[in-house]
Amino acid sequence: MEWEGGRESGDVEDRRGLGPAHIGGIGAGGVVLALIGYFVFGISPSSTLSALSGGGGAPVEQQQGVRGTPADHAGRFVDVVSTSVNDVWTQIFRKQGRSYRPPAAVVLYDQATGTGCGLGQSAMGPFYCPNDQKVYLDLAFWQELSGRFGAQGDAARAYVIAHEIGHHVQNLLGETRQAERLGAHGPTSGSVRLELQADCYAGVWAAHAAEVSGGKVALDPKDIEDGLRAASAVGDDTLQKETQGQVVPDSFTHGTSAQRTRWFHTGVTTGDPAACDTFGADSL
């Protein structure tokens, strides 16, 4: 994947090295994030919640990191890719007569950090918090992505960033609220439709990245395969087989591996956000 030399916006908040956030009361946001950790990355809710509960009832501490472009290679990659994703959506919104507002920041952290949705923890994997409009990422997840899920390379990592910013796009367009009305669990739930649409939105970014960046950020066919592999690796059915030994469709929150792969591919091949209408689709 080409990315060196891509535009950097400095919209990264680097909290690495600050240490874990103070853990007070869990709150509803913490419960939601624990469940995200389970259904996306196979982390047990009980173990996540036990780590979240620190007693005392104090709110989760909101840490303040350094804002700007990180000096290290991994941090610069996040800045370039997230900037590219935002540039693509800025152009798409402009063509639709809309104004795009990027996420408040992409937050890099270690172990745990306070968020507008409760305590964020590295075991939960990357996530987007609509309350503060920030994407949260512990870069240790890159090792999990390649080692556990077998999704290697920069393109697989870029897919993750583009997917999370896709959730921000959904938040701006009101699709997040639409999903809430359709339920959180099940093969056709609002949660599944939301996640599959974010996969498709990640594909839309991949389709336009080279054009919008002047070729400085670009994915070749092998990179697209790496992205497809990443999407497939985190399907509900695949993760449930690994962690539970059986597939339970009624508890799906993100879609099957085949669905996630198909919707990412739809975004790549069409480059059209309108093709990502998982809420109006007869079949997912």
Image: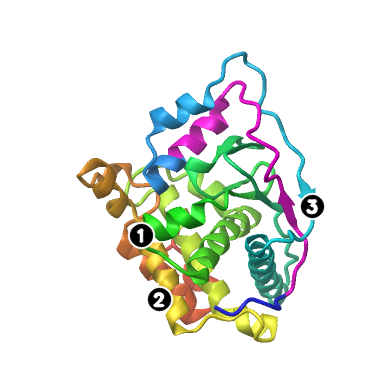
Q: Secondary structure at mark 2?
A: helix
Dot 1 amino acid type: Ala
When the figure is inspected, residue 7 is found, relative to residue 237, above or below; the finding is: below
Q: Rounded to the nearest whole Å, what is the CA distance between mark 2 and mark 3?
A: 33 Å
When the figure is inspected, residue 163 is found, relative to residue 3, above or below; the finding is: above
What x and y, as percent, mark residue 51?
49, 27
Which of the image's four quarters has the N terminus?
Answer: bottom right
Q: Secondary structure at mark 3?
A: strand
Q: Are marks 3 and 1 in contact (CB under 8 Å)?
A: no
10 Å neighbourhood of mark 2: few (<14), some, or many (≥20)?
A: some
**Disc marking residue 10:** none
Q: Secondary structure at mark 1?
A: helix
- State the residue position of label 3: 67
Sequence-first tag of 2 and 1? 2
User: Which one is in front, 96 or 160?
Assistant: 160
10 Å neighbourhood of mark 1: few (<14), some, or many (≥20)?
A: many
